Image (tube, helix red, strand yellow):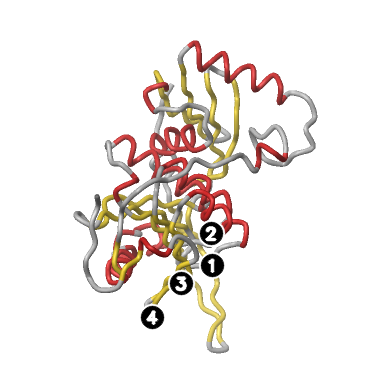
Amino acid sequence: MTVDTPPSIQPIARSVWRSGAPSTGIRMVPEETAVAFTYNRTAHAVMMASPTDLEDFAVGFSLNERVVARASEIEELEVVSGEYGIELRMWIGRENGTRFHDRRRYLAGPTGCGLYGVESLAQAMRPVPWVASDLRVSGDAVRAALAALPSAQSLNRQTRAVHGAGFWDPASGLVALREDVGRHNALDKLAGALVRSSVSAARGVVLLTSRVSVEMIQKAAVMGAPIVVAVSAPTALAVRIADTAGITLVAVARDDGFEVFTHHHRVTAGSAEYVA
């Protein structure tokens, strides 16, 4: 049975020690909920996440983790709330379901790996798809995209404790933004939102309010995003994988500028940008 999900923000009483004297008040903090992904009634993963945009989360996670190749392979989706958390209950077709169950049987044995749904170290470093795109954006456009983020981050404005992932289109501006206590979750939610709205990630820029780890680049590559812009720094492995995937990685992006680490040709001087 599908029921109401918990609120995404909770008011918490606390005492404040500043300027040498205590006071009392209320702090708005983000909720964190266990979210389980199940396919054909078989458990796959449990993530701690914000209880928002859960249909987007289900679709984006399923695509980015390659449980399905297309959103249409998810034949049914239910959001079911219970005592201990939320279940994203999905049904996939027979062919995909058989492949999924075969993989789960393999995972039933000890693997010595701490990553969910990963069978080996080689799979953790699975090849990423090549992102082919003629998209070009100007430095001014990168700054404009970043400037559009704060006003769209409603959860973060209230809590200062969640990550955001946005998609900026040169022709339309900020098309979508999703927030979550987990940076990977925010990007999965964004991926799902774009697919469910029939928006191609190849036509714009993925914006991240977090640091850039390799998993974020792997997910961006599956999405087909040619440019990733992050406010914080990347890891060295993330830079190498972005280069391998053909992704332009822009990071340490602040009010005073940014740094381009890979495939520099997509960021141009001046104010012109285009999508081929």
Q: Which residue is mark 1?
A: 233
Label 4, on which residue?
A: 256
Identify the residue position indicated by label 3 in the image: 259
Q: Residue type at mark 1? A: Ala
Q: Look at 71% across and 26% down and name the residue there.
A: 107
Give whichever of discs 2 and 4 has the lower sequence position: 2
Name which quarter of the figure residue 118 lies in.
Answer: top right
x, y percentage for residue 224? 40, 43
Q: CA distance from mark 3 to mark 1?
A: 9 Å
Q: Secondary structure at mark 1?
A: loop
Q: Residue at x 53, y 16 (%)?
A: 97
Relative to residue 50, is residue 243 depicted above or below? Answer: below
Say whether marks 1 and 2 touch (CB < 8 Å).
yes
Q: Amino acid at mark 3?
A: Glu
The N terminus sits in image quarter: top left
Three-letter amino acid code of the residue under disc 4 = Asp
Q: Which residue is mark 2?
A: 212
Q: CA distance from mark 1 to mark 2?
A: 6 Å
- Counting from the top left corner in percent of width and height, residue 189 is at 42, 43
Earlier in the chain: of badge 3 and badge 1, it is 1
204 left or right of 8?
Answer: left
Neighbourhood count class around disc 1 (C-alpha, 10 Å): few under 14, some 14–19, many 20 upward = some
Q: What residue appears at the point 22 percent right and 70 percent down from the top-left corner?
A: 271
Q: Amino acid at mark 2?
A: Val
